[in-house]
Amino acid sequence: MYQPIKFYAHGIPYLKDDKIRGRLIVIEGPDASGRSTQIELITSKLEADGHAVVNTGLKRSELVSEGILLAQQSHTMGKRTLSLFYAADFADQLENKIIPALEAGYVVLADRYIYTLMARAVIRGLGRRWCHNLFGFALVPHLVFYLDVDPAELVHRVFLKRSSLDYYESGADMGLSDDMYESFIIYQGLLAKEFYKMQKRYGLVIINGNRTIQEINMDLQKRIDSFLGSGSNGKLGL
């Protein structure tokens, strides 16, 4: 079943009259919250059920993703410049990957979306209105889940993945603490508070991310199956 494209604000003018058959589902959450693992599991399940699926996420634009990585390595990029860099990355993917896939009837699973970008920018001192306006061209997803994980549990998971904490994911650029561990805990707590502030405005569904991978997946999949199953034959009109 076709639906009109819905943007948060000004949108993309030449696409305002377009219609889509697919569904956009977002999995948000902090570093090491298990987003990517859940995306993989959900993708496999949906494909087994007969859905065509496309995955997307931050820093995956062929246009600017390499530039973001290089800029971050220097640790000298300003907060506004960083936000604009990420906005360009997102805009490129939205126009050339996400919208075409939705028009073709795919389920698009996004490993993070504009909410992470806005939360990061706000806690670094950029205004909420500025952030909302910056991403006013973004599509309104059909479902948005936020994996809420205790910062202390996140640290444990990070060190299971790698041997050090990420500079930006620890808020080291903000001068929160001279101790990287303490900075990470403070920063992740600030992010979580910002996500809870966004919950009502953007329709975020809070998911307890402190549980096992299997428990979280069962919770997410049940909600997604219920949503997709409410359509015609559960196959989005394909």
Image (tube, rainbow, N blue to C red):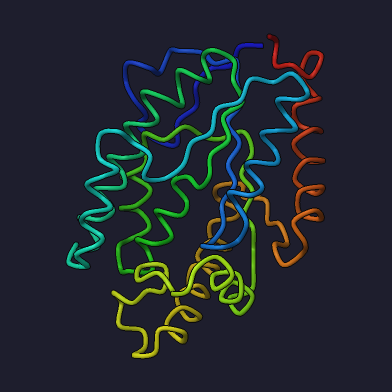
Please tell me which residue lies in front, 232 or 201.
232
Q: Where in the figure is residue 51, as x and y percent of width and height? A: 69, 20
Please tell me which residue lies in front, 198 or 219.
219
Image height of 189 relative to 16, above or below: below
Q: Where in the figure is residue 82, as x and y percent of width and height? A: 25, 56
Q: Residue at x 51, y 62 (%)?
A: 31
Q: Where in the figure is residue 49, as x and y percent of width and height? A: 78, 23
Q: Residue at x 36, y 25 (%)?
A: 95
Q: Where in the figure is residue 7, as x and y percent of width and height? A: 45, 31
Image height of 216 relative to 50, above or below: below
Quadrant in the picture for the C terminus: top right
Quadrant in the picture for the N terminus: top right
Quadrant for residue 34, please give it: bottom right
> Seen in the image, is 86 located left or right of residue 215?
left
Q: Residue furthest bottom?
A: 178
Q: Residue at x 59, y 71 (%)?
A: 154
Quadrant for residue 213, please give it: bottom right
Please tell me which residue lies in front, 45 or 4.
45
Please tell me which residue lies in front, 141 or 54.
54
Q: Residue furthest front?
A: 163
Count up the numbered dots. 0
> Seen in the image, is 108 located left or right of residue 135?
right
Quadrant for residue 11, please give it: top left
> Seen in the image, is 206 located left or right of residue 21?
right
